[in-house]
Image (spheres, grey):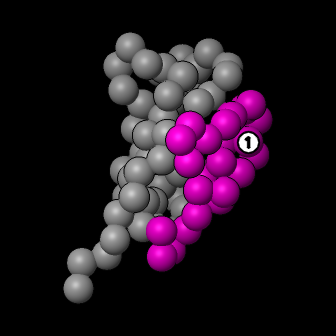
């Protein structure tokens, strides 16, 4: 059976340079169940995270962004 996959968008209030975005994506990948965290070009404040909701939660993803020192909110989550 295929795992279920959900997407959540996280808004980061701070301005992140390329290195900071890369570091946050890598940090998200350390969470079990995260499949693909990514920032879309031109939308540097918005991170979309594809994840398996059976393994992790949107609250855990938001907590990870906040623990990295960012002010963040879920959008539509």
Secondary structure beneath dot 1 equals helix
Residue 17 visible in the displayed image: yes
Relative to residue 42, is residue 44 drawn left or right? Answer: right
User: Is 76 or 24 nearer to us in this picture?
Assistant: 76
**Residue placed most toward the observer, 72 or 30:** 72
> Residue 4, how many percent across, how many down?
34, 71
Q: Is residue 58 left or right of residue 71?
A: left
- Left or right: 20 as drawn, with respect to 60: left
**Position of residue 9 measured from the top left corner of the image (x, y, whole percent):** 49, 40
Considering only vertical position in the picture, is 72 above or below 16? below
- The answer, for residue 24, to whether it is visible in the render is no
What residue did someone put label 1 on? Answer: 66
Q: Residue at x 48, y 68 (%)?
A: 53
Estimate how packed mark 1 is, as few (under 14), some (14 to 19) or many (20 or more) residues with alpha carbons within 10 Å.
some
Residue at 67% across / 20% down in the picture? 14
Tell me, yes or no, whether the highlighted magenta stretch contains residue 12.
no
Residue at screen point 62% across, 28% down: 12
* Depth check, front residue: 73 or 37: 73
**Which span of residues is magenta-colored?**
53-77
21 vs 33, nearest the viewer: 33
Location of residue 13 in the rendering, given as x and y in whole percent from the top left corner: 67, 22
The vertical placement of 54 against 71, above or below, is: below
Is-magenta flag for residue 70? yes
Residue at the location (56% across, 37% down)?
75
Above or below, comparing residue 30 to residue 43 in the picture = below
Quadrant placement of the N terminus: bottom left
40 is higher (above) or lower (below) than 54: above
Q: Position of residue 70 (x, y in %)?
A: 72, 32
**In the figure, residue 34 lies in which quadrant?**
bottom left
């Amino acid at each position: 059976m295929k795992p279920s996959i959900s997407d959540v968008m996280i808004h980061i209030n701070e301005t992140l340079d390329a290195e900071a975005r890369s570091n946050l994506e890598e940090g998200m990948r350390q969470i079990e169940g995260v499949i693909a965290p990514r920032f879309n070009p031109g939308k540097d404040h918005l991170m979309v995270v594809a994840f398996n909701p059976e393994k992790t939660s949107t609250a855990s993803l938001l907590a990870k962004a906040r623990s990295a020192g960012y002010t963040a909110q879920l959008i539509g989550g």
